[in-house]
């Protein structure tokens, strides 16, 4: 089960405290609307990444949302 999680655009830390099933779900979610701060570097900008791609390393920001 892949979820979308927040990844800091500054240091790349992935925040798994909150995850969403899809981009659409994230967009309407109050937690997504809320201000976010990176736990590692206090950066406030993030991108949504698929949780299952995390750990593969190299390619970085693959935001792929299956349209099922
Ligand atoms: Zn950060």
Image (spheres, rainbow, N blue to C red):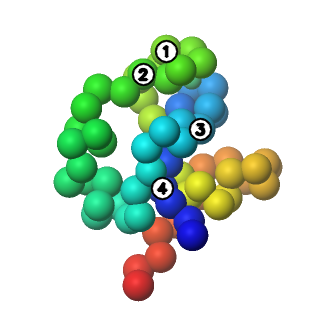
Ligand 1 within 8 angstroms of badge 1 C-beta: yes
* C-beta proximity under 8 Å, tags 3 and 2: no
Q: In the image, is residue 64 above or below residue 4?
A: below
Residue 57 versus residue 28: which sits nearer the camera?
28
* C-beta proximity under 8 Å, tags 1 and 4: no
- Residue indicated by mark 4: 4
Residue 34, position in %: x, y?
Answer: 25, 32
- Residue indicated by mark 3: 14
28 left or right, relative to 37: left
Query: Which element is circle 4 on?
Result: strand
Work out how far the residue at label 1 is from the one at label 2, CA to CA, in angstroms.
Answer: 5 Å
* C-beta proximity under 8 Å, tags 1 and 2: yes
Q: Residue at x 24, y 49 (%)?
A: 29
Q: Earlier in the sequence, mark 1 or mark 3?
A: 3
20 left or right, relative to 5: left
Residue 1 versus residue 6: which sits nearer the camera?
1
């Amino acid at each position: 089960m892949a979820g979308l999680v927040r990844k800091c655009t500054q240091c790349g830390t992935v925040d798994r405290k909150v995850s969403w099933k899809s981009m659409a779900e994230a967009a309407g979610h109050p937690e997504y609307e809320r201000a976010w701060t990176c736990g590692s570097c206090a950066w406030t900008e993030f991108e949504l990444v698929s949780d299952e791609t995390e750990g593969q390393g190299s390619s970085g920001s693959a935001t792929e949302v299956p349209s099922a």
